[in-house]
Image (cartoon, grey):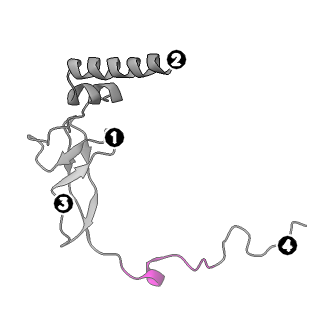
Amino acid sequence: MAGGNAIRGSRVGAGPMGEAERGDTAARQRISFWCANRHETQPSFAEGAAVPEFWDCPRCGFPAGRDEANPPAPPRTEPYKTHLAYVRERRKDEDGEAILAEALAKLRGAR
């Protein structure tokens, strides 16, 4: 004889399944969106719900629009900048040389 558990395979709080118990679902409409890579996405929306202008493509992550002929352009990503690159944007080489000379003079004076 098995374990003797009469509700095996069910979970606490689970009720009967089916539309009669839950009520009717809202009417749905499927809207097509296309990204720059020509991927088509068809999320469903409730009838009468506001449909967004853009949707994120689940395959590539680019924004997708409703016009297949003119999909939105992919976002432009900036390359990663190091701390040194940001410093060089703010300061000239002459400033760097002056700061370096000051720091070296301070180190030599401490000896």
Question: Does label 1 or label 2 sit earlier along the sequence?
Answer: 1
Pointer 3 residue: 52
- Stretch of the chain drawn in magenta: 13-24
Mark whose residue sits in front, 2 or 4:
2
**Does 24 sit left or right of 57 as displayed?**
right
**Upstream in the sequence, badge 3 or badge 1?**
3
Residue under label 4 = 4
Residue that numbered label 1 is attached to: 59
Of pointers 3 and 2, the one earlier in the residue sequence: 3
- Say which quarter of the image contains residue 70: top left
Residue position marked by numbered label 2 in the rendering: 111
- Give the alpha-carbon distance from disc 1 to disc 2, as whole Å: 62 Å
Secondary structure category for the residue under label 1: loop
State how far apart marks 4 and 3 are (Cα). Answer: 53 Å
> For this view, does 5 lie left or right of residue 93?
right
Query: Is residue 32 located in the magenta-colored stretch of the structure?
Result: no
